[in-house]
Amino acid sequence: MARRKVNLQWISNNATRRAMYKRRYQSLEKKASELTTLCGIKMCVVVYGDRKAQPEVWPSDVEAKKFLKKFRDTCQMLAAS
C-alpha cells in the first residue's frame, strides 16, 4: 500500500501544531529505537522544538553527548589524515 504525499505547510492553530509535533517526535523516537535494536547501531536524536530553550534528546542527554563527542573526534581524526 503506497503512502500519500505529505503536504508540508505551516499549521496555524497552536494546539494542532503542538499535537502534531508531539506525534511526529514520538514516531521519530520509536524509529530510532527500532533501528538501534534491529541493526545494532548507536544513534541519537536531537530535535529543537518551536520556542523551546532546550532541545529534546533521545535516548538521554548524557548518551547523546558521548555519541556526539565520539563522532566529532572521528571527524577530526579523518580530517587530519
Image (cartoon, rainbow, N blue to C red):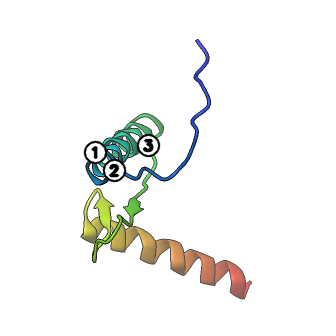
User: Can you tell which quarter of the image residue 2 is in?
Assistant: top right
Q: Mark 3 points at which residue?
A: 40
Name the residue at the right extreme.
81
Left or right side of 35 for 63: left
* Residue 19: numbered disc: 1
Q: In this view, does 42 lie above or below 67?
A: above
Q: In this view, does 7 lie above or below 10?
A: above
Name the residue at the top extreme.
1
Name the residue at the bottom extreme.
80
Left or right side of 1 for 79: right
Q: Name the residue under label 2.
A: 13
Left or right side of 15 for 5: right
* Relative depth, front residue between 16 and 62: 16
- Mark whose residue sits in front, 1 or 2: 2
- Mark whose residue sits in front, 3 or 2: 2
User: Can you tell which quarter of the image residue 26 is in?
Assistant: top left
